[in-house]
Amino acid sequence: MASAPENEKNASAPEKKTLTLKSMINNEEFVVDEHVALQSVTIKNMVDSDCAGDVIPVPTISGEILALVIEYCKNHANPSASEDDLKKADAGIVAKDIYTLIDLVLAANFLDIKGLLEVTSQKIADSIKDLPHQDVREIFGVENDYTPEEEAAVRAEHDWAFEGFP
Amino acid sequence: MENRDLKTSSWTSLISVCPLPEDVILEILTRLDVKSLSLLKLVSRGCNAFLSLPSFSLLYSQKKPSITAFFYQTSKDYPQKLQYVQIDPKDEPIFDPPSCLGFLDYPVFLRNSCNGLLHWSSTEGTQRQHFISNPLTNKFVEISWPINSNELFASGIVFNPAISDQFRVVVLAVRSQQSLKLMVFSSKTMRWDKVRRTLAFDTRELPFCPDRGVFLNGFLYWESNRNALIAYNVDDQHVHLMKLPLMSELNRNLGFEDLGCLGESRGRLHYCRVMDTVLSVWVANQKSSDNSVDWVHQYSVNLSNAMCEGSSIIRPRGPNNSVNWVHQHLVNLSNVICEGPSIIRPRGARALAFLDGCECVLVGVEGKVMAYLLNGGGVREVCKVRRNGFTSGYLRPSEFFPFVHSLALSNLPSKIIDELSTCES
């Protein structure tokens, strides 16, 4: 790997610099162009403050999710991609089950990638929109702490919203 | 994201039961529609407490555009008949806005709307029943009206859900030729203020639509019959007059059909009016010292060019249910706005409302409502205007009620109507 000179930003090195991201969950490694990885504010801060070694360890994010994140960053680092192309590509990335989406939104939040956070949050919102609240409890691991009477009272209050729900 | 105020005890009760970080939860929740949020209240106590926080309502509203939908009256003979049209395809449609008033056995009429709240009243006459409702949360407040309908000079709702979840109703009545009587209802106290101020104002200057006060930037505005805006300052409780810009070639008196619309972007008041076929937009340079105003001309567009010979329209829905402004050629354009092969000039077109930070204007044209993009010049059809089952006629500003999805009134207990103390006038 070409060693970067001290003055990091002003050096317009013509050769592409790469970074290696390593999932600490299953030790999978991904080599990506630096400008692709820098869409993550978290990684950018590490690189800017010289905290990044050759391999950047990414805790709590699996290789499967990291691959999706990198796919997103690659798409959005491509200057020739049209808005329509990006929309389609984003839709493909978030066409996943709710549990994958939750991992993905956590990854986007941890790596601080605003666009990915937004598009994944929207998809999660769209997915839970039509779910009965029992399913929402299960998905997000929320315990039902209502007494049956309380639950009935809250339900009565929002009676109108329950059309078509069991 | 600024949400420090949300980190309250109710908030911690939610995160203690949900493994997601708070920013992520807010990111997801603020993308849900009002009905889905109501369903989520059943998930747990913490969820309910959190979703009922006023600060959550505020954050939710801050993320919404100023208008996401509108109602219009579909019949002149039966003004209680309304049609709902959503502008933002992501929002949940509502089909029966008065449903939350369904217990009433008499018809109510939509009077005004303000940032997600609707103002209804029963038929003119002796009954003075008025309601403020949010059809999305099915909550409403009954307000006993302080004056007879023939005493009304002007009224309006003061409500901005991105600033406060409380609303006020302002009523101005004629006291003499030179003064008005001010009455203010506050949702905090659920009664009319005891103090009734007298405001100096030349009452020959009449609002065209007395109960259609438009709330923007801390002022209620009514367009008057003398090419001016009647402006009521909510904070200092004063009324003053603001002259409106004139079209240069104007050589007739202004009438009901010349009403324009108001909007706000970056704190500045915008005004749009269609005269004949020319749509113009001005931005107000207001001097607070003497309440004077300079209208700076921003755009003028000839609608017959823009809509019949222009270069772009957009389809109502894209593949992902999103709105796409699509460029199409002349043939399709003439289908959209001009009936048949002969080009009809959109005479009688009316500016109805500003959208998207005043970058876009809704215009009522023959049989349709169109959205006109000011900067790029794109036009799209928002809906057909159906009158008694037929597609015909122009939608006039007085028949048009902008609406935004908000959690307004969601914190009200449903039994509020029983507890309401009536006001004594």
Image: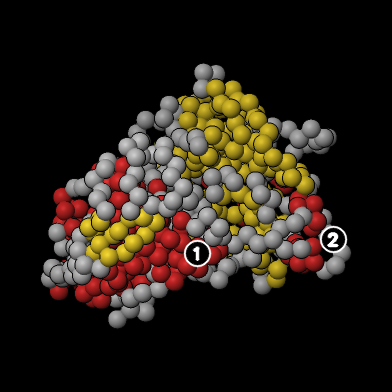
Q: Name the residue under label 1.
A: A87
Q: Can residue A106 be seen in this view?
A: no
Q: Is residue B274 visible?
A: yes
Name the disc covering residue B343, or none: 2
Left or right, B12 with reference to B179 = left
Q: What residue type is labelled 2?
A: Ile
Q: What residue type is labelled 1?
A: Lys
Q: Is residue B307 above or below residue B288?
A: below
Q: Which residue is drawn at 43% across and 61% down?
A: A74
Disc 2 is placed on an element classified as loop
Query: On what subunit does the disc labeled 1 rest?
Result: A
Left or right, B105 with reference to A32 = right
User: Is disc 2 surrounded by few (<14), some (14 to 19) or many (20+) residues within 10 Å?
Assistant: some
Q: Which residue is drawn at 44% across and 51% down?
A: A15
Spatial CA distance of label 1 from label 2 is 37 Å
Disc 1 is placed on an element classified as helix
